[in-house]
Each structure stands twice: as C-alpha cells, then as structure tokens.
Image (cartoon, grey):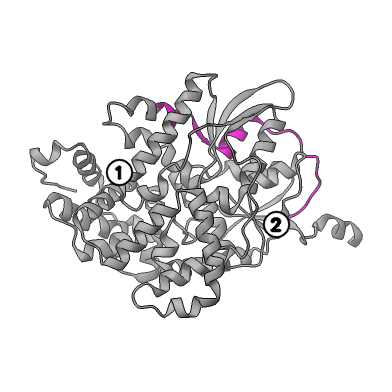
C-alpha cells in the first residue's frame, strides 16, 4: 500500500511503525474470510482491510477520529485471526492499537460511553474493586429488566449483569505474593502472573498451575508488587494507564530476575500472555523501560508452552473424557500456540476434539462482550453451536475471558487446560466436573 506521510509525521515513532505496517498491506482481502465481524455484518469497513483504509486515512491526514472510524474500529475484536491469514505479514495488532490510542486522544465519545469505559478501566484491573462490583451485580441482577431498558446504555448494563457469576468463588489462599517450593529437587524457578479478573472469577486456574508446576519440580513465585498486566486498558486505547500498570508488573518481575533469577514468567491467561510478550514493542522507545520490558517479554511463556518444554510425568488417572479444545484467539493468533495444549491433553489420556470454525472468536475479547454485546452474543451462539456439535464431556481453554463468555452459553462444563493436566498427573478432579461421569466405566460395562 502506498503512503504519503510527511517527514514530520514519521519523526513520531508510533506513526513510523504504523506507516511500515500500512506499506506491508497489498489489499489482497484474504483477511476478510476469517474476520468475525465481516462474517456477521458483510461490511467491507468491518473487515481488517476496510479498517486499514480508515486508519490510514485518519493517520496520514493527521485527522482526529471521526464517528465512522470509531464505529468500525470499536467493532474490531482484536482477535488477530487476520494476522494468521495474511500472506504479507501485516502486523494488524500494532496498527489497531495505535488507532485506538489515537481515538482516545482525539475523539470525544458520548458522555455515557465515556462513563462506562472509565468505570471498566477503574474496576477490572483491580481485584478488590472487581470483587465489590460483582457483589453489586448480585444485588442488581433482579433489576436486569429495568436496567436493559435504560436509554443508550441498557444493553451494556444488561450484558454486565449477565456475565457476572451467580456466586463468587471464595478467595484463594494462594492468591498472594510468595514462594511455593517444588516437590523434590528443583528443576526450575518461575514467576506466575496472579492477574486481576481471573484471580476473582476463577482462582482455581492458578491453583492448578501451582500444583502442576511444583509437582514437577518447579519453584513458583508470585512477585510482590505485581498487578494487572495492562492488557484490558491497553486494548481500550488507554495508553497512559495501561503502561503504568505494565511498568509496575515489569518492575516486580525484574526484581525477581535480578534476585534469585527466573527461568520463565508463566501466564495462565492467554490474553495477558499476548500483551506481556509484546512489552518489548510497547516500551521500545522508553529509555527507562525498553531493556527491562524486552527482558520480560523474552522469558514470558503460556503455561502450556512452559510445561511442554518441561515434560509431564505419566498420567496417574485413567479417563476417556472427550475434551473440546477451544483455542483462544490470543493463544492461536496472538501467540501462535496451536498444537501444544492439544498434545498435552492427548498425552494425559483425554480424547481431544477440535471445534469446527475454531479460528473464529467466541466474542469475549477483553471488554468487547460488554461494549459490543449484540455482536458478542452472535459470536457466542455460533461458537457454542460448533462446540456442542462435537458432543464433548468438557470444554478446555486457556483464557479466562473465553471461559466466562462460552460458559454463559452452554451447560457443558468449561475448565482451564492446566486443570485437566493437574488432575491427570495427581491433582484433584476439577470442581467443574462434578456430575460428569467418566466414559471408561460405561465402556467397560458394555464390553
């Protein structure tokens, strides 16, 4: 794609990076075939190629964001399926992130939209605030019908109430800074991201990861001072707040790296992992954090990625449960991890089935299922129908957003991949599987 940015514009590192991305695009349109919003809406401007044209016109012309640009960029899930499909290597993620930051700086959103986004940014990255908000949602659920009828924001308020769990899990005793020693000789030392929303909604995910890692000789540390990785607000275009959150977490991990040392930073939420692996790019022009961010990104690993390299012990539980593996967009498109989780589950004794249209987003996408509830609901229905088509006993995924989104659309239990791996190698059976019968006794009886 030809561009005509001025030398003054290209003096801005963010603009120079976006100009390079724009020049990579060859208009081929392959991305339209795998873009969820284009599949739903059929509008060229709701495809990556269409959004690239809008973003180019906005940035190249030095224009403030227009309502049209905002509408179509807001509809983008950042699922990154287009990046997997693109034969030219267009780094759409960096381009749309830049566009969102530009929108936040140059566009005055309606008051109700600004207020909702401000509340999400103030609440979601902070576990204690998020827990209080969910308690409030429990009280507000009986009034969902009234909330849904409120002008302009009713659909979003209803979506928030629908996504809130019926009951909050109890606080995990392991959700704290500290060290978890390995069982037996130490084979490695890792930091585990505690996270924000996940630690409130599904503390069992990290509990399983700690058990699995320590059982296999890995010392696990949850660094003091670490907080939200910044992913949620980063993808809302809130550059200053997201970078502040990320810096705090980078500092916490660097202290561990420069102290007793780390072999890896292990992440159980693939959405967070994609952002953490991108810290090196995010802070490339920050003299105080460029090196530190690059060091953190270099050792960041999804938990299944790390465990694959570690090697799991032989399974001690015999099961023939059928697992539908839902590969989160941030896992398969953002991090390029497609086979590792499925291979681990198969080796652990589970029958693993791929989900039809597995490359299409479930509609979670951070705060997307709140900010774009109608589109997210269509995508969830499509995803659930495809999952139920393979008739699994359980759904496994590696991202809290997907687990929450899909779990609201089906009765099939959904767990983190690491919970099944932990169970197979000596940990407790995941609580979500209560009531799910193993197929093996039934098969044995039939024989």
Of 66 and 145, the residue lying toward us: 145
Residue 89 point in image, percent of width and height: 33, 43
Q: Which labelled disc corresponds to residue 240? A: 1
Looking at the image, residue 284 sits to the left or right of residue 40; the answer is left
On screen, residue 66 versus residue 138, left or right, reads left
Say which mark, if any, is on residue 422. none
Is residue 382 visible in the rendered image? The answer is no
Image x and y of residue 437, in percent: 80, 60
- Left or right, 278 with reference to 263: left
Q: Is residue 259 above or below residue 387?
A: above
Q: Position of residue 75 (x, y in %)?
A: 34, 63
Taking 78 as reference, is 431 left or right? Answer: right
Compare marks 2 and 1 and give the one earlier in the sequence. 1
Image quadrant holding the C terminus, namely bottom right
Q: CA distance from mark 2 to mark 1?
A: 38 Å
Q: Residue at x 39, y 78 (%)?
A: 150
Which residue is under mark 2? 432
Q: Residues within 10 Å of mark 2 (few under 14, many from 20)?
A: some
Asked whether 146 or 290 is in front, the reply is 146
Residue 52 higher or lower than 241, as above or below = below
The 10 Å Cα crowd at callout 1, few under 14, some 14 to 19, many 20 or more, is few
- The span picked out in magenta is 295-321
- Element assignment for label 2: helix
Of residues 189 and 258, the one nearer the viewer is 258
Q: Position of residue 90 (x, y in %)?
A: 31, 45
Where on the picture, by quarter, is residue 373? bottom left
Residue 302 covered by magenta stretch? yes
């Amino acid at each position: 794609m030809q561009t005509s940015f001025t030398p003054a514009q290209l003096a801005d590192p963010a603009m120079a990076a976006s100009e390079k991305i724009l020049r990579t695009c060859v208009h081929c349109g392959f991305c339209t075939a795998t873009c969820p919003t284009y599949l739903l809406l059929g509008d060229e401007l709701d495809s990556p190629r269409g959004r690239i044209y809008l973003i180019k016109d906005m940035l190249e012309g030095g224009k403030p964001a227009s309502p049209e640009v905002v509408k179509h960029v807001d509809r983008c899930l950042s699922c990154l399926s287009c990046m997997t499909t693109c034969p030219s290597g267009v780094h759409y993620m960096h381009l749309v992130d830049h566009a969102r930051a530009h929108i936040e700086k140059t566009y005055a959103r309606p008051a109700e939209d600004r207020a909702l986004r401000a509340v999400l940014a103030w609440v979601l990255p902070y576990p204690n605030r998020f827990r209080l908000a969910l308690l409030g949602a429990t009280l507000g659920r009986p009034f969902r019908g009234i909330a849904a009828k409120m002008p302009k924001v009713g659909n979003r308020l209803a979506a928030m109430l629908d996504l809130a769990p019926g009951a909050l899990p109890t606080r995990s005793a392991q959700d704290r800074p500290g060290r978890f020693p390995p069982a037996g000789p130490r084979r490695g030392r890792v930091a585990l991201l505690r996270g924000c929303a996940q630690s409130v909604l599904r503390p069992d995910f990290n509990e399983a990861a700690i058990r699995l890692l320590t059982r296999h000789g890995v010392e696990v540390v949850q660094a003091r001072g670490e907080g939200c990785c910044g992913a949620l607000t980063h993808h809302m275009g809130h550059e200053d707040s997201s970078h502040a959150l990320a810096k705090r977490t980078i500092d916490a991990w660097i202290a561990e790296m420069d102290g007793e040392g780390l072999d890896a930073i292990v992440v159980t939420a693939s959405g967070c992992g994609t952002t953490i692996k991108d810290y090196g790019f995010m802070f490339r022009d920050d003299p105080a954090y460029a090196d530190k961010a690059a060091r953190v990104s270099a050792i960041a690993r999804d938990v299944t990625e790390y465990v694959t390299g570690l090697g799991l012990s032989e399974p001690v539980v015999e099961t023939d449960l059928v697992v539908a593996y839902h590969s989160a967009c941030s896992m398969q498109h953002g991090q390029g991890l497609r086979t590792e989780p499925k291979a681990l589950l198969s080796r652990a004794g589970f029958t693993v089935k791929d989900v039809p249209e597995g490359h299409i987003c479930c509609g979670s996408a951070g705060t997307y299922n709140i900010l774009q509830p109608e589109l997210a609901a269509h995508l969830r229905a499509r995803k659930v129908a495809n999952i139920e088509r393979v008739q699994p006993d359980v759904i496994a995924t590696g991202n809290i957003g997907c687990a929450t989104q899909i779990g609201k659309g089906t009765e099939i239990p959904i767990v983190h991949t690491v919970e099944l791996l932990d169970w197979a190698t000596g940990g407790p059976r995941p609580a979500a599987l209560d009531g799910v019968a193993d197929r093996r006794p039934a098969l044995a009886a039939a024989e």
